[in-house]
Amino acid sequence: MLKLAILGFLRDRPMHGYELRRHLAALTGHIRPLSDGTLYPAIKRLEADGLLVRETEPGSTAAPRHTLHLTPEGRAALLERLRTPEQLDISDENRWFTVLAFLRHLDDPAAQAVVLRRRLAFLEEPASFFHDETGPLDAERITDPFRSGILLIARATSRAELAWLHDMIAALEAPGGRDLTATGA
């Protein structure tokens, strides 16, 4: 997901490494802290793969600064990753949020709706964190109040996301497919 997030933020605009790190930490740092030992080798790999370039700018009072820019190949890689996310990108909530953070870069409402439909299908499958010999347990069948709480919270979150997905898909699939990126909807 780091590659997707780097490409997505640089698609928004060119950035210095430190600024990019701040944006990445805001998106995923609460779940997966990001160290310089992870970020900068990833940037070097993307640069070696031709997906981004580093341009040197004179520093105003200090040493020259390096700005990272997405290449056309980087844009193409970002769009492909958004168009065809891996199943884990759909099923893992934190990875899903990273996909969702940049899905606006797909400029085709139908393509956006396809990705949202994959998440919708995943959420509509019966699931539980806890099982017994008869199968998945729901909150009402669990006597442990903390485990029951996990399921109640997950249920409320899923309901909210399902409602949002249905609304967004309907808007994207409306005649002419609404461009929702400009409205902030």
Image (cartoon, grey):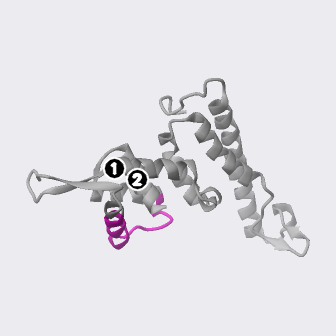
Q: Visible in this render: residue 9? A: no
Point out which mark residue 49 bears.
Answer: none
The percent coordinates of residue 83 (x first, y second) are 56, 47
The percent coordinates of residue 74 (x first, y second) are 39, 51
Q: Amino acid at mark 2?
A: Leu
Residue wearing tag 1:
70
Which residues lie in the magenta part?
28-45
The percent coordinates of residue 65 (x first, y second) are 17, 56
Of all residues, the one furthest to the top in this rendering is: 175
Q: Amino acid at mark 1?
A: Leu
Q: Determine the residue positioned at 66% across, 37% down.
A: 169
Residue 29 sits inside the magenta stretch:
yes
Mark earlier in primary sequence (2, 1): 2
Q: Visible in this render: residue 163? A: yes
Report the quarter where the C terminus lies.
top right
What is the spatial separation of the Cα atoms under label 2 and label 1, in whole angstroms? 7 Å
Of all residues, the one furthest to the left in this rendering is: 61
Disc 2 and disc 1 in contact, CB within 8 angstroms: yes
The percent coordinates of residue 129 (x first, y second) are 74, 68
Answer left or right for 155 relative to 58: right
What SS does tag 1 mark?
A: strand
The mark total stands at: 2
